[in-house]
Amino acid sequence: MADKYKVVIIGGGPGGYVAAIRAAQLGLKTALIEKEYIGGVCLNWGCIPSKALLYVTELKRTVESANRIGLKADNIGIDISKLKKHKDDTVKRLTGGVRFLLDKAGVKIYEGTASFLSTTEIEILSGTSKTKIDAECFIIATGGSPIDLPMIKMNGQTVIGAREAVDLPRIPESLGVIGAGPIGTEMATVYNTLGAKATIIELLDSVLPMLDSEISAASEKALRKQGIDIYLSSKVTLSKKNGDRIDLEVETLEGKKNLTFDMVIVAAGMKPNTADLNLAIAGVKVDSKGFVIVDKQMRSNVTNIFAVGDVTGGLLLAHKASHEGIVAAETIAGFSAGADWKAVPYAVFTDPEIAGIGLTEKEAQAAGKKIKIGKFPYRAVGKGIATLATEGFAKVISDTETDEILGIHLFGPHSGDIIYTGTALMEFDGTAEDLGHIMAIHPTLSEALMEAGLNVNKKAIHIIN
């Protein structure tokens, strides 16, 4: 006889495990199914391990740059084995903590791959054993995986994805990175600092093309300054093995180029993990790219089946998935909840760090908004000068008539932490004037965001307009 639950969550990443904990908190009999590791891609192969690597490599670059202001440190090296241990220990601690929270919440964990048998029943395949589960409601939280490119196949050795890259299989002499999104730029930054000669190849005309154009331009400049080569508006058309290396044929603005690398990382986008779910049997609709279609309550077209996180498309962010998981769980429990946030922040952990929220300048203009912009450079902030963060800046976009903030974009150290103030303000319809009146501690880099808010209306103190 099948086990019965109020709600079953398929996938144990940031969307799934948070949904499971919240459902259990609300008194719902809850089960979670995960086919690999609790924590999903984010904790095991994405957000967390990559930040552990980025932190160490950032320290190396910071110490080297601080040599010019008196810090004596020569021949700085990184012990790869210790770095990998730190990364592994960090992952183990966090995933262990999540499993502990699930256990304490009373969530039943099943290991295996789930597939729908009907709208109320699934089957879990674990090795050769099969288990059937009945539930009143399901939450699909299976996430996404890297897109396969037809012209270059990942083999886990010379051609790898982000999952393999964070395990530092080796530090090649030369590294090609296909894709200049967050994953591509972050991995290029890590490996370049560890000694590889990194080259980024991007199909579109800018690095981090989804970001505000001024942020993208500043990021490109910073990456090139670190010694990373970048080919924009370029396409890999052919790849072939060349002994222990790989040859790429690339169409660039300057014509066709033949590039050879010891290793290539493919970071060209994500696809939803829905292939094993048998969604058609349950009648769940997906869009043209396979992402599950949901409403503001994260409910699919089938009333008792919900979906959260990367499997639904849109902004593929761990924190967004977690909040969507809470919405789905609370909706199932009968509460009035909705994924209708005005403010969903993002961050890219390159060097310098990047963060933003809301509309870019081009998006605001395309939407027909009449806008005014306030910018403020970190070179005009005391902490920016003292800590060599002078390349950074803050940018605030607001509505000309109402002064309501439409977007905030940061380029500089700790941007991911500083953006939280803007997130809260935007969520509650704050204005640029409001932002300028919120006190920032002196001396901190957050003063640049405050002054950018003031500068929207030409009231900034520490800059001449």
Image (cartoon, rainbow, N blue to C red):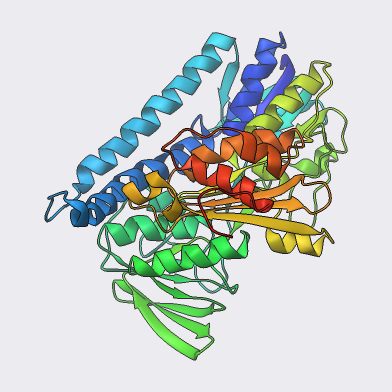
* Res 114 seen here: no
Q: Residue 137 lies in what quarter of the image?
A: top right
Q: Measured from the top left, where is residue 367 in percent x and y?
A: 82, 60
Residue drawn 77% across the image and 47% down it? 403
Q: Position of residue 373 (x, y in %)?
A: 68, 57
**Residue 410 seen in this snapshot:** yes
376 to 98, vertically: above or below: below
- Residue at 51% of width from left, 31% of height from top? 39
373 vs 247: above or below: above
Query: Of 363 and 126, which appears nearest the observer?
Result: 363
Image quarter in which the C terminus is found: bottom right
Residue farthest to the bottom, as pictured:
255
Residue at figure coordinates x 84%, y 38% from the top left? 295
Q: 384 or 103: nearer the eye?
A: 384
Who is closer to the viewer here, 248 or 178?
Answer: 178
Going 38% across and 25% down the picture, which residue do you hit?
Answer: 93
Picture mark count: 0
365 versus 7 height, above or below? below
